[in-house]
Amino acid sequence: MSRKPPRENKPNADPFSEALARIEQARETGATELDLSGLGLTELPEAIGQLTQLQKLDLHNNQLMTLPEWLGQLTQLRELNLDFNQLTTLPESLGQLTQLRELNLSDNQLTALPESLRRLKSLEKLFLHGNELLTIPTEV
C-alpha cells in the first residue's frame, strides 16, 4: 500500500450508509478488495466480517478509535491500511490475520502493540510512524 494523503470527507454524506452500500456491492460481486477510506467512519459495520474473501481492506483517513475483535475473521487479508485514524489500541485478533503481508498503522495514537502480532509470519511491511509507541514487542 502506498501512502496516500488524506482525502476530504464529503460534507452532509452519511458515512455508515455509504460504507454499507460498498460492503453490499463487494458481497454481491465477491470482490477481494474493499475501499472504505475517507468516509469519516467512527466504527466498522459488522457486515465487513462476512466478507471472508477480502484480501485488501483500505480504512485509512477515518475516525476509528478501536477495532472490533471480529476483524480477525478476515483471514484472507493480505493488505490492511489503517493510517490516519485515531486508534489507541488494537485487538488481539489481529494475530489471526496470518496471510497479512502489509499492515499500515501510521498516524494513529497507538502506545502499544498486541503480542499477537508476532503470529503474522507473512508480514513483510509494517508501518508505524506517527504513533506514540512506548515499546514494540521484540518478536514483531
Image: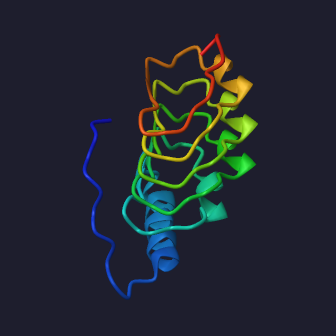
Q: Position of residue 98 (x, y in %)?
A: 61, 24
For the point 64% across and 11% down, the residue is: 138
Instruction: Work out which quarter of the rendered image holds the C terminus and state it.
Output: top right
Q: Position of residue 58 (x, y in %)?
A: 42, 49
| Colouring style | rainbow
Q: Position of residue 122 (x, y in %)?
A: 52, 16
Q: Is residue 104 left or right of residue 117?
A: left
Residue closer to the observer: 65 or 38: 65
- Is 124 rendered above or below residue 85? above
Q: Is residue 105 left or right of residue 12?
A: right
Q: Total of numbered circles in the picture? A: 0
Residue closer to the observer: 71 or 111: 111
Quadrant hosting residue 76: top right
For the point 27% across and 36% down, the residue is: 2
Q: Is residue 5 left or right of residue 89?
A: left
Q: Is residue 90 left or right of residue 4?
A: right
Name of the residue lying farthest toward the top: 139
- Is 122 rendered above or below residue 17? above
Instruction: Work out which quarter of the rendered image holds the N terminus and state it.
Output: top left
- Is 64 rendered above or below residue 70? below
For the point 26% across and 46% down, the residue is: 4
Residue closer to the observer: 58 or 34: 58
